[in-house]
């Protein structure tokens, strides 16, 4: 059968051709518009999908709520207030800017030029208001951070504060609001229990402990996704409490996380004396800043308000003596507490408001708080024995069954089974589904615990002494049926008291860890440690003098009649006067004197004004200002005219610190009638006085007819971190009639708007460092990515420019070879002050890593 085409007449054929052509032309004409519409639809679908992906899942919402509530309880006064109610934004002592050859050096203010950088003694920096950073600012440099600081300086609060802000998506400078914090205590990781292939398994297990039941199956994927998407910020608390073995386990855990998720940023904690392998992992140690007058005043103001609104309404508070006016209480509290740690100051405030204050010393406040935490009918000897056994076993995180055996002699006749032991995790806090601030919920969950604020709590059914100590808040329970002292300072205090009747030499022989240092510190208050001090001072410890400085920390609360005080003070005087030693070392001796509470220190400092050494006079002036010696005003006024710039600066800082009318009048005279350098010193020093100093700077900035006063005011205002100073400086850079003043204002405004040079930045491998590659090229060498070029870096330290010498130290600090130490010591004692200080800090960090530091004398240098 043949196929036939249909018959189509000519008209229909051509009509079809025309219509087809017209349709095709229309489609062709509108194709760009159609393509644009299609792209718009795709973009909208993509944006909708991205928005849906940004919305937190139910698991993430629940996790954020849980972290917020836990973080709000991670502070000393948690039985009374939520963290957000009482916290003062924590800050860190800013490190010196890292030198990068080929870049312009940053501006350095009067404090950076005059006050030595003392990370182990931050009290001097707080007195003179050295530069500080928030933790979020420090993290903006993409560096891993280890928070260092002595017990009670606020490391835990710093982590909890940042975690609270991040889970609420509060604006945080330097960090994305999408960052998800994983706030974990090292004891909860239970790293000693077993080895696991998945580095996130300890986190999954820990977070699952307090996650809703319906979320448990989704927790592993939720955590893995956060780390894979580079949203995770790992915050590990409690590392500073661990003995060396436990710390090493945490270091290995961090290594496994970084190996699988290399972009994950980590913040952890450590004791200043022992950083173990953290520096080798490229962590930057940052010291907690000590509190100054302003921060103490803010705490007192908040405490008075919250106490009146909440605690004073409790039934137990109504039965005590008549309340004293908070203004009078706060004035008395702030008088003699300048060098208290935040923990010590909080305890002192608490004891005064609760009416159980036992004395003016930090140790009196600790004693009052421990009495509050002592369970009913529990002998103090049981608590001391537990703390002593924990210390001797170097087990800060211990098995409660073992602890039960340690103190079973003190147990009441009938005790409950050990399985009844509870913990903080047994207190279920109400969830906050709406994500609001948790103060109300927190107060509801802690109402009963708040009754411990002033009086002994009522006797509860006995579950054994260990259980009772958990219930009172003295001990905290962790995952895996492990426990620790809630605050290591409490364990150290109790262990120190118990050591009075024990051979303390056993503790002295322990490796460095916080329990050792705390126990010896509080033993020095309650017992005779003359033998220990003699042994410490008899051991050569050059170039760091760690043994002397360890004993020097005990001076503050040691009995004035203690025989060993004279030994330590004499050695400190010797160190302070030794020329050629790093100012950072001699400055530690100065800080020890300032904190010693010795009535003769002011006379000693004033005697040093006549010394032939410019560095000794500089330190003495700083010391007089730190103790606010009014008898030193005349001498400091004379030193402000000394030819040495550093002595002038130190004298100006000291006069403002003393802050009397006579002292400020002396500074005012320099600002109006001194030479150019004196005027700038005076203006920068006045920035440390928020009252009279700020007012004088504002007046100086507007003083017509005196160019030099206005120019000096620019540099003074540069040190005031307040919005109103930005307004003044911005106006001066455009409206001041003199170009000299305008140029100075422009310089300061640009510096304030630029990147903060104190923010630590991740150290690149030498093969990726521009200056290392350039220096190697000058030597006709190359840099391989597989190894550190030790010889090349040593050559840079020996023969490079000043910038290259300083920059080489960032790498040499992780190379503990004998040849490295020899070159470091040769350069440190060669006479260049800036290099000397930088090398000393490098050696100090190496020692904190547990590296054995050789005596410089064996290399033919040192003293």
Image (cartoon, rainbow, N blue to C red):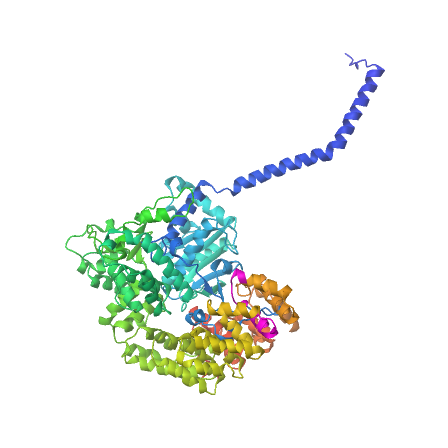
537 up-or-down from 341: above or below: below
Residue depicted at 25% across the width and 68% down the height: 497
Q: Is residue 608 left or right of residue 6?
A: left
The residue located at (39%, 63%) in the rendering is 297
Residue extending furthest toward the left: 413
Of 66 and 88, nearer the camera is 88
- Indicate whether residue 364 is drawn in magenta: no
Which of the 4 quarters of the picture holds residue 41? top right
Q: Is residue 16 above or below residue 592?
A: above
Which residue ends up furthest to the right in the rendered image? 10
The stretch drawn in magenta includes residue 704: yes
Quarter holding the C terminus?
A: bottom left
* Residue 751 found in image quarter: bottom right
Question: Where the N terminus falls, by quadrant?
Answer: top right
**Residue 242 makes an appearance in the image:** no
The magenta stretch spans which residues?
703-724
Picture coordinates of residue 684 (x, y %)?
A: 52, 72
- Which residue is painted at 35% across and 56% down in the image? 305
Residue 88 pos. (x, y %): 42, 59
Is residue 666 toward the left or the right of residue 297 in the image? right
Report the side of 437 relative to 485 (left or right): right
- Whether residue 182 is visible to the viewer of this picture, yes or no, is yes
Viewer-side residue, 296 vs 158: 296
Identity of the residue furthest to the top in this view: 1
């Amino acid at each position: 059968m043949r196929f036939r085409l249909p018959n189509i007449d000519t008209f229909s054929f051509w009509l079809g051709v025309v219509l087809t052509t017209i349709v095709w032309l229309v489609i062709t004409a509108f194709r760009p518009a159609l393509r644009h519409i299609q792209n718009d639809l795709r973009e909208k679908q993509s944006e909708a999908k991205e928005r849906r992906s940004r919305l937190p899942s139910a698991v993430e919402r629940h996790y954020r709520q849980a972290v917020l509530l836990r973080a709000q309880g991670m502070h000393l006064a948690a039985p009374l207030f939520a963290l957000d109610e009482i916290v003062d934004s924590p800050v860190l002592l800013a490190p010196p800017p890292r030198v990068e050859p080929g870049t312009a050096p940053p501006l350095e203010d009067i404090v950076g030029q005059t006050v030595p950088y003392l990370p182990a003694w931050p009290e001097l920096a707080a007195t003179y208001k050295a530069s500080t950073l928030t933790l979020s600012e420090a993290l903006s440099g993409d560096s891993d951070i280890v928070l260092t600081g002595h017990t009670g300086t606020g490391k835990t609060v710093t982590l909890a504060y940042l975690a609270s802000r991040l889970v609420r998506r509060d604006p945080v400078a330097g960090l994305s609001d999408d960052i998800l914090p994983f706030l974990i205590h090292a004891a909860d990781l239970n790293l000693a229990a077993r080895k696991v292939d998945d580095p996130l398994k300890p986190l999954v297990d820990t977070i699952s402990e307090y996650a809703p039941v319906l979320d448990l199956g989704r927790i592993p994927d939720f955590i893995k996704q956060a780390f894979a998407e580079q949203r995770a910020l790992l915050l590990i608390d409690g590392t500073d409490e661990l003995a060396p073995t436990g710390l090493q386990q945490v270091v290995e855990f961090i290594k496994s996380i970084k190996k699988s998720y290399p972009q994950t940023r980590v913040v952890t904690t450590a004791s200043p004396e022992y950083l173990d392998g953290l520096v080798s992992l490229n962590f930057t140690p940052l010291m907690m800043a000590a509190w100054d007058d302003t921060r103490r005043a803010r705490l007192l103001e908040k405490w008075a308000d919250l106490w009146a609104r909440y605690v004073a309404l409790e039934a137990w508070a109504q039965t005590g003596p008549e309340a004293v006016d908070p203004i009078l209480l706060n004035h008395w509290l702030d008088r003699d507490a300048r060098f208290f740690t935040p923990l010590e100051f909080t305890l002192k405030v608490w004891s005064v408001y609760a009416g159980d204050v036992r004395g003016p010393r930090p140790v009196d406040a600790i004693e009052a708080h421990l009495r509050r935490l002592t369970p009913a009918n529990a002998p103090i000897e049981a608590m001391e024995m537990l703390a002593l056994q924990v210390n001797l076993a170097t087990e800060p995180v211990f098995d409660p069954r073992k602890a039960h055996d340690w103190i079973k002699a003190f147990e009441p006749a009938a005790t409950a089974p050990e399985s009844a032991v509870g913990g903080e995790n047994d207190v279920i806090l109400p969830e906050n589904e709406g994500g609001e601030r948790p103060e109300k919920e927190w107060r509801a969950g802690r109402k009963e615990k708040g009754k411990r604020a002033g009086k002994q709590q009522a006797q509860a059914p006995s579950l054994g002494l260990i259980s009772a100590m958990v219930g009172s808040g003295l001990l905290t329970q962790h995952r895996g049926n492990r426990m620790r002292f809630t605050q290591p300072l409490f364990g150290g205090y109790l262990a120190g008291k118990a050591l009075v009747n024990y051979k303390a030499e056993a503790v002295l022989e322990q490796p460095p860890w916080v329990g050792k240092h705390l126990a010896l510190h509080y033993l020095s208050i309650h017992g005779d440690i003359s033998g220990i001090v003699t042994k410490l001072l008899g051991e050569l410890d050059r170039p760091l003098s760690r043994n002397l400085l360890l004993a020097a920390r005990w001076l503050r609360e040691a009995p004035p009649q203690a025989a060993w005080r004279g030994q330590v003070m004499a050695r400190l005087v010797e160190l302070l006067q030794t020329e050629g030693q790093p100012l950072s070392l001699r400055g530690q001796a100065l800080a020890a004197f300032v904190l010693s509470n010795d009535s003769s220190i002011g006379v000693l400092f004033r005697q040093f004004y006549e010394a032939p050494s410019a560095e000794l006079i500089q330190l003495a002036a700083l010391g007089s200002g730190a103790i606010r010696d009014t008898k030193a005003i005349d001498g400091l006024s004379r030193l402000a005219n000394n030819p040495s710039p550093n002595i002038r600066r130190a004298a100006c800082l000291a006069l403002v610190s003393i802050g009397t009318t006579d002292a400020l009048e002396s500074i005012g005279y320099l600002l109006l009638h001194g030479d150019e350098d004196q005027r700038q010193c005076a203006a920068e020093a006045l920035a440390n006085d928020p009252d009279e100093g700020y007012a004088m700077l504002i007046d100086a900035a507007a003083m017509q007819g005196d160019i030099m006063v206005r120019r000096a005011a620019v540099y003074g205002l540069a040190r005031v971190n307040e919005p109103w100073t930005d307004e003044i400086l911005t106006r001066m850079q455009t409206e001041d009639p003199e170009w000299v003043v305008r140029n100075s204002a422009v310089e300061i405004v640009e510096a304030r708007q630029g990147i903060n040079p104190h923010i630590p930045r991740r150290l690149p491998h030498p093969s990726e460092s521009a200056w290392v590659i350039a220096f190697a090229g000058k030597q006709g060498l190359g840099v391989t990515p597989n190894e550190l070029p030790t010889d090349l870096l040593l050559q840079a330290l020996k023969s490079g420019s000043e910038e290259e010498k300083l920059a080489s130290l960032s790498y040499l600090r992780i190379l503990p070879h004998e040849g490295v130490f020899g070159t470091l010591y040769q350069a440190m004692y060669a006479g260049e002050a800036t290099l000397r200080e930088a090398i000393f800090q490098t050696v100090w960090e190496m020692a904190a890593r547990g590296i054995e530091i050789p005596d410089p004398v064996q290399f033919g240098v040192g003293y």
